Structure formats: structure tokens, C-alpha cells
Image (tube, coloured by chain):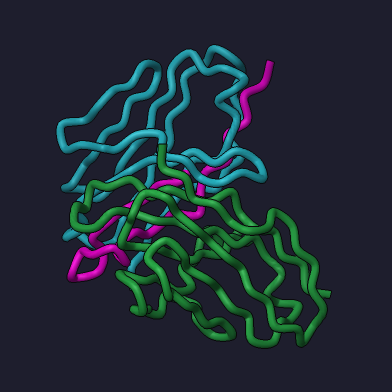
Amino acid sequence: DVKVTQSSRYLVKRTGEKVFLECVQDMDHENMFWYRQDPGLGLRLIYFSYDVKMKEKGDIPEGYSVSREKKERFSLILESASTNQTSMYLCASTPPGSLNTEAFFGQGTRLTVV
Amino acid sequence: RKEVEQDPGPFNVPEGATVAFNCTYSNSASQSFFWYRQDCRKEPKLLMSVYSSGNEDGRFTAQLNRASQYISLLIRDSKLSDSATYLCVVNGLYSGGGADGLTFGKGTHLIIQP
């Protein structure tokens, strides 16, 4: 089974802190994604990556950056956390190519910025 | 702008009943379609892909209507364990149809009542 693992289930950070959310997948998938999910807004794509060292902005990249130094790891960085970044963050991965592919999600990180 | 629209509900349905909900998508060039299920405070997981000819998996039936640009999910003989949020997912809304083309609806909340 594909496994996508996020480093933390729950995280509490202070405003202005630099926050790292880590995601690791074990199926050699090329594509990795970071979403945030908020009530009434659904899943919104923050950043995604097709390959190592490649990154593309999603729909809401402002206030975030990412790092993909190794194929299996995709990190989301909040340079200076703000209270409006309190959310559930979900990492996902997919294999390349086919449009009919399933996206596999990590268990989510519930981040609270105080 | 790309859109996938769902009725957020909640749908309150007695156990054993049949329930159906739809999802509409904006781009006729969309190429693949899925239903995901998300339990409270958990990550989304693939429920079923939706094929042009329609498909059935046990009590679940998915249909695609390309002419009207909607997909549907029908649940027969509903169980208490079916209570969840059902996410409509469409791929290929971007012109390239690549990995970034996965677009999620905001979800339909289903509550099965005993």
C-alpha cells in the first residue's frame, strides 16, 4: 500500500514563527501536492511538484514556500506564520502520467497559529 | 475559472434509504472523474472512479453525464457507516491535464440516521 506520512498530526505555533510541515511518500511518486482544507472552502491547492527541485504555485501560494530536495519528501514552509494560516494541511502524491490515477493523502496536520 | 460544484448538505437520510447527490464541473474538456470519501478529521480516500459508461461497486453507483457536465453518486441501502463527506474530484480542468489538474469540490456532508 502507498503510504504518505506527515510529520505531525497536531501543531501549535506562535505568530511570526517559521513553520515546517514535512511529508514523505514511499511509492516513488513523481507528483506531490500540498493542500489546505477549511470549513466551507474545501481543499485548496497551495503548491505542487512534478519532480525533485521542481515546484509550481497552486491556487493560494501566498505566505507559503516549498522544498523538494528528494523525490520522496515535500516540505511546506510558512516563513512567518499568521493566524489566518490556522488550518488542516494535507499532503498528497500521485504517480506520473495517467489522468485516471488515484491521489493518496497523508493523515493531515492540524496547525493552529496563536 | 475552474469549478467543481457540490451541494454541501447536510443530507440527513434514514438508515436503509437510497441517497443520491450530484456534482457539476465547468470545463467540458475534463477527462477523468472520481468520488472521494472523507471521514471527520481524517484524510480523503478514493471511493470510486467514474467511467463514461457508469460503474457500480456494491451499494454505490457512479454516473457521468458529459453533455450536462455532471457526475452523480447513488448509495443504496445506506448504512450508518456511510456517514461522511463525499468529495467530487475532476481531473483535466487545466489545459495540459497534468498533475495539477486535480480539482476538488467542497464536499457533500451525508448523515445516516438510525
Quadrant of image for the N terminus of chain B = bottom left
Instruction: Tell me what residue is drawn at x 47 percent, y 78 percent.
Output: A67
Which one is nearer the viewer's eye here, A84 or A20?
A20
Q: Colour of chain B?
A: cyan
Given residues A81 and B37, the one toward you in this image is A81
Is residue B101 in the magenta section? yes
**As displayed, is residue A44 above or below residue B43?**
below
The residue drawn where x is 69% and y is 15% is: B114
Q: Is residue A65 visible?
A: yes
* Residue A75 on image: x %, y %: 53, 71
Task: Please give the name of the residue rendered at 24% of the width and 58% of the height, measured from the top-left corner.
Answer: A96
Give x and y (percent) for residue B72: 34, 37
Q: Which residues are magenta?
A: B87-114
Which quarter of the figure has residue B55?
top left
- The x and y percentages for residue B22 are 39, 41
- Percent of width and height locating residue A90: 55, 58
Left or right, B114 with respect to A96, comes to: right
Q: Which quadrant of the figure has residue B93?
A: bottom left
Is residue B98 toward the left or the right of residue B43 in the image?
left
- Where is A110 relative to A67, above or below? above
Residue A39 can be seen in this image: no
Residue at 30% in and 69% down: A50
Q: Is residue A39 magenta?
A: no
Above or below, B81 relative to A55: above
Please identify which colour was used for chain A in the image: green
